[in-house]
Amino acid sequence: KTIEELIQLLKYDISQNPIEENIQNMGSTRVGILIFERYYHRVRCNITATIVITEYENKQNVDVICSGCAMIFNYGANDEFARAVSNTFLCENFKVVENF
């Protein structure tokens, strides 16, 4: 799938539009950057998911970083948001390496 198709899948699976979306062409490499934000009641703050999709020679790499809560313990909110994003790519047969 193209970066644009993966972005549409993410929007559908996460059920929201990103607060920032940018696709850049750099020679033979394309990079898509998305930032999603979701409020988690259990920690009373927003968690941000920054997603970078890099495409080079028809191969794609996706990096996901979730952060946000100023509390020492976020009660799994960051991990939950990261897994929601990861599930989209698992369904598309991506190899997912979790570092939660």
Image (cartoon, rainbow, N blue to C red):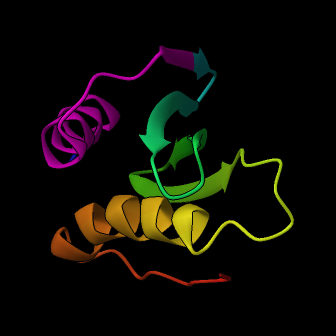
Q: Quadrant of residue 91?
A: bottom left
Q: Is residue 33 magenta?
A: no
Q: Nearer the viewer, residue 17 or 29?
A: 17
Image quadrant where residue 52 sits: top right
Residue 76 percent coordinates (x, y): 57, 74
Classify residue 28 by image quadrant.
top right
Can you give x and y, in whole percent of width and height, for residue 86 in the image?
38, 68
Residue at point 86%, 66% (across, down): 72
Q: What residue appears at the point 17 percent right and 43 percent down from the top-left corner?
A: 9
Q: Nearer the viewer, residue 18 or 37?
A: 37
Q: Residue 19: image x %, image y %?
A: 47, 16
Can you say whether 30 is above or below 94 in the image? above
User: Of residues 23 and 58, which is closer to you in this image?
Assistant: 23
Q: Which residue lies at the image location 59% right of the left edge and 62% below the top edge?
A: 78
- The answer to whether 39 appears left or right of 70 in the picture is left
Q: Is residue 5 above or below residue 17?
A: below
Q: Tell me the quarter of the image containing the C terminus.
A: bottom right
Q: Position of residue 38 (x, y in %)?
A: 44, 38
> How many marks overall?
0
Question: Left or right: where does residue 56 sit relative to residue 94?
Answer: right
What residue span does the magenta drawing correspond to? 2-24
Please tell me whether residue 6 is drawn above or below residue 58 in the rendered image. Answer: above
* Picture residue at 72% right of the left edge, 44% below the top: 68
